[in-house]
Image (cartoon, rainbow, N blue to C red):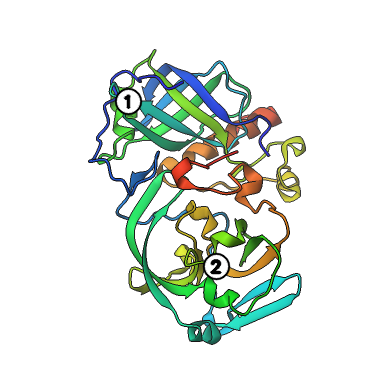
Amino acid sequence: MNASRVTWHTATVASATPETPSARRIVLDVPTWPGNRAGAHLDVRLTAEDGYQATRSYSIASAGEGPRVVLAVDEVSTGEVSPFLVHDLRTGDRLELHGPLGAYFLWPPSDAEGAHATAAAAAAAPVQLVAGGPGVVPLYAMATARAASAGRRTE
Amino acid sequence: MSFVTRGFSGRRREPDPAVPPGQTLVEDWPVLSAGVTPEVSTDDWDFTIVTEHGRHMWTWEQLQALGPEDVVVDIHCVTHWSKLQMPWRGVSLDRLFEEVETEHDYVMAHSVGGYTTNLPLDEVLDGQAWVAFEAEGEPLTPEHGGPARLLVPHLYFWKSAKWVRGLTTMASDEPGFWESAGYHMHGDPWTEERYW
């Protein structure tokens, strides 16, 4: 279960840097963010001058307490939102976030956070994480949380 | 509290009254599943409805004998994609419930692998829900829930349980799998009942 009630947040872009030729790491300052567990996702909502809105779901590349939230967005060239996030978004821009969402695709680093007894037991053992393309984003959050919990590097 | 994000104009299409708020049209058919994809043969497939009075079961052949129908419906996933005018073939739950008596007001759908999702009984009757086994003219593949999945197109598509094997009636509304993980108990796409 989510620790905090899910709501809308105002995010300000702290930095946006190339991650791959088609993907960008976007670091957001979200003062009201309640924190999130590794593997959670969120919705990004963009509003145009005329009120038109577009909403998309993205995995979160960071874990733990706010106010920093990291996304890594891969461009879908025919898409509507990802090209804007990858090419046009600038430091200081503001956007809306809804989340954190999802309480299932999680790999808790410690027993205390275990959503499932099996997951908590498995947290003590080595795990192989496999993903393709932008699917690595939540795994990055999981590995980071795991490394922070264990007090050692995994990279 | 919405505000303008600098520089965003969007590539909007003509507003389509068939697309609920917050949704984007797709032409392909995305696959989102929790857990492994089961391979289920129709030879050992059956569908069970359990009520406060007892159990009703249909084999694959018995389900087919109830009379499949072809429907064209729009589907809406909570992850913001919609697919319009999609042809499906399946047996209406009305046909199954013709043989079932219950005073209960809710059902829990159960799937191979343990997935569950809750629905109000009166929203799976009167031509609103099917046990579907074909989509776009082809048998449902395992990744899309084959051999049979629930089809409840007026609710977000996590309610249309893949690999469905039965329904259990309930006196009160209990949360299923995603509903226990933050998703809405009802899931109406037109009022954006996405999360609680």
Residue A121, percent from left and from top? 75, 47
The reply to whether residue A155 is in sight is no
- Is residue B76 positioned above or below A13 on the image? below
Please name the residue shown 58% across and 44% down the image.
B183
Residue at the far top: name it: A92
Q: Which residue lies furthest to the left in this view?
A: B14
Q: Could you say whether the residue bearing mark 1 is in a helix, strand or loop?
A: loop
Label 2 sits on a secondary structure element that is loop
When the figure is inspected, residue A84 is found, relative to residue A138, above or below; the finding is: above
Q: Relative to A62, say whether B196 is above or below.
A: below
Q: Residues within 10 Å of mark 2 (few under 14, many from 20)?
A: many
Query: Which quadrant is home to the C terminus of chain B?
Result: top right
What x and y, as percent, mark residue B180?
66, 47
Residue at left 57%, top 68%?
Answer: B164
Q: In the depicted view, which residue is nearer to us: A60 or B114? A: B114
Q: Left or right: A138 with respect to B70?
A: right
- Which of the chains bears the disc numbered 2? B
Residue A49 position, x and y percent, is 29, 21
Q: Quadrant of residue A134?
A: top left
Q: Mark 2 = which residue?
A: B163
Badge 1 density bin: few <14, some 14–19, many ≥20, Cα 10 Å: few
| Residue B129 % position (x, y) | 50, 65
Alpha-carbon distance for marks 2 and 1? 40 Å
Chain for mark 1?
Answer: A
Which residue type carries mark 2?
Trp
Q: Which amino acid does label 1 sit on?
A: Gly
Q: Nearer the viewer, residue A27 or A19?
A: A27
Q: Can residue A78 be seen in this view?
A: yes
The total number of labels drawn is 2
Q: Name the residue under label 1.
A: A51
Q: In this view, does A62 lie above or below A66?
A: below
* Residues marked 2 and 1, same chain: no
